[in-house]
Amino acid sequence: MKLGGYSHTNGITFFCDVLKLRTVYKKQEIKYEIKWIIPMKWLRKLEKKPIIGGLSVFYYQWKIFDNKVKALIFSLIMIMFLDEFFHIPNVNNFMNLSINNWWLLGIGVIIFLINFKRMSRLLRYHGAEHKVINCFMKYGYVNEVLAKQSSRFNKRCGTNLATVFLLLYGLFYYFKVESILLAVILLLISIQFIKKMAEKETKWDALLNLLQWVTVWEPSDKELEVAVKGFTKLHQSYLIYQKEVMDRNRVFKA
């Protein structure tokens, strides 16, 4: 069973091979929204292929993001494409900030401080997401007691993927080698690296998870409750789906 999640400021979206379930806590009420995200057959075949198998990660992440995040990602990609072919001056200047442009970073800090309450809730939900997934991977089921005792760090976290990608891309950038194609290839390589690292415990795990001290916070009891209830509904839905598939296969064989 493929497992993953995406935290937002008012809850968590968990996903598996075929379903995603958005869990939102708003106005003292937990609400759920479930949708199919079954990938195409050709994409499922590619999953086991080296390097290009990482394309399935793009698919699942795109499926679970909400429209605001999709719009932001699409805008950033368009800026990268435009800069690649037309060399936009403002983009290049932003990537190479001079002392006179540090005010841009100041604005970013101010925006973060204004939204600190929302951002901190997002990071706590991120921790709740990890705890629930780690709990299920260890015990095969989830409850609030076991989830609370589980680690908030997860080697498959997007933070780790971003860290590995930036290290690789930074190396090429240092030698003035950069392109969109290179970025895509390095991202696919980073995905494979993270997958391999997640398969076993190593002495490098603490170093790999280092940035998660910043991006993954310890959740409150309520945030953990939201995560547990959301994941439980996803798992129950997945079991129902499996049973229906097995029953259908028996009918066809008969």
Image (tube, grey):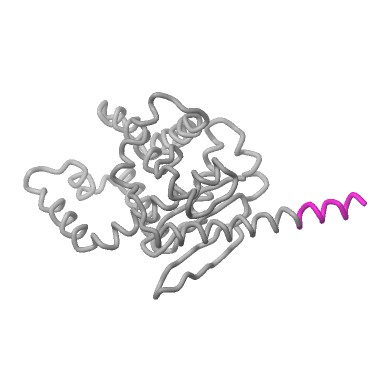
Which residue is located at x 32 percent, y 31 percent?
167
Q: Say how many tags the image has.
A: 0
Which residue is located at x 60 percent, y 57 percent?
19
Residue 86 location (% of width, % of height): 30, 47
Residue 79 location (% of width, % of height): 32, 51
Q: In front here: 75 or 58?
A: 58
Q: Residue furthest right?
A: 254
- Please, is residue 105 above or below residue 225 in the view? above
Q: Residue furthest top?
A: 203
- Please, is residue 150 above or below residue 195 in the view? below
Q: Let me know if residue 63 is in the magenta part.
A: no
Q: Let me know if residue 253 is in the magenta part.
A: yes
Which residue is located at x 26 percent, y 62 percent?
117
Q: In front here: 139 or 129?
A: 139
Q: Residue furthest left?
A: 100
Per the picture, the main secondary structure of the magenta-coloured stretch is helix
Residue 12 location (% of width, % of height): 45, 59
* Quadrant where the image shows the N terminus: top right
Q: In front here: 133 or 64?
A: 133
Q: Is residue 224 left or right of residue 174?
A: right
Q: What span is in magenta?
A: 244-254
Q: Is residue 205 left or right of residue 35?
A: left
- Please, is residue 158 above or below residue 8 in the view? above
Residue 144 location (% of width, % of height): 48, 55
Q: Residue furthest bottom?
A: 27
Rendering quarter of residue 111: bottom left
